[in-house]
Image (cartoon, rainbow, N blue to C red):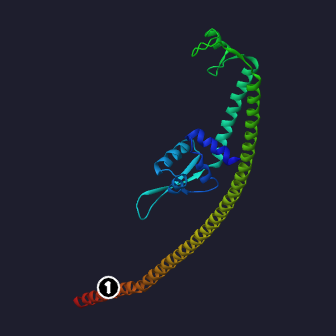
Amino acid sequence: MQVKLLHNLVEELAGENTGRIVEILFNKKDVNEFLIAKKMELTINQVRNILYKLSADGLVSFIRKKDKRKGWYIYYWTLRTEKCLVKLEQSLIKKIEELNKILMERETKRFYLCKLCDIEVSEEKALEEGFTCEECAEVYELSSNSGPIKDTKAKIVRTEKDLGLIKNELEIIRVKESKRRSRADKKEAKELEAKKALLKASRAAARKKIAKEKKMTKKVSKKKIVKKKVKKIKKKTIKKKKLSKKAPKKKIAKGKIIKKKTKKIVKKKKAVRKRK
């Protein structure tokens, strides 16, 4: 049923004898355009024209791959079933609205028929033409609305039934899609959590490393400070030792000077005594 309805939809959009493409693409993925042309017994350009019309409404999608031997691109087509069903749903809703409009007109208005030309016109049109056919000048007869009303009601019932089937199919597809998305979302959430945990662990490891490096730098700086202090203390002790060593020499030098002075004084005294 679904294939038949989609077949009719494609023919409405792309023209007669194009609905066969649905049977070729239905429930398949990435079908080679040359294979489609072969099965439909059409040229590749004719098939592409059909597919481009359907692609304009978003009913088919494609990918292209480069042929390694020939060097040109080949297109692979996929029928977008959900999009097709949505389009078909909209088309059937519109059709039901039109049929209800026709039914209301048949139930509330009168129509006239030219039996010779088999032409039916509304009461307004018949009045404008003087109740005579423009083609053959035959007088119009009042048409019975019972037959058209019955046919229109039957069409409405069939279309509503088709619409119900389409809605059910859409519901099934949407449920499947929501489940697929929820699975994909869960998988993505798990991957995200794993990434976050890994990032957290790597950051913690980095912080530990930085803390260790800081401790090491502090220890090194403390050692340097201690060494500097030790060096300063050593320098001070060396200076003190040097000073302590130099001090007696100065005293000796002073002592020598005193001795020299005393010697000079003694000599002077002796000289003075000799003179006397």
Q: Residue at x 37, y 84 (%)?
A: 254
The residue that label 1 is drawn on is 261
Point out residue 178 in the picture as x, y percentages from the top left corner.
71, 51
| Identity of the residue furthest to the left in this view | 275
Point out residue 240 in the picture as x, y percentages from the top left corner.
46, 81
Q: Secondary structure at mark 1?
A: helix
Residue 74 higher or lower than 15, as above or below = below
Q: Quadrant of residue 18?
A: top right
The residue nearer to you, when weighing 164 against 251, is 164
The residue nearer to you, when weighing 155 against 239, is 155
Residue 26 higher or lower than 201, as above or below = above
The residue nearer to you, when weighing 48 against 186, is 48
Tag 1: residue type? Lys
Point out residue 167 in the picture as x, y percentages from the top left corner.
73, 43
Mark 1 burial class by Cα count in 10 Å: few <14, some 14-19, many 20+: few
Q: Residue at x 62, y 10 (%)?
A: 128
Q: Quadrant of residue 207?
A: bottom right
The residue nearer to you, when weighing 234 against 50, is 50
Position of the C terminus by quadrant? bottom left
Residue 95 higher or lower than 25, as above or below = above
| Identity of the residue furthest to the top in this view | 130
In the image, taking residue 202 as reference, residue 276 lies left or right, namely: left
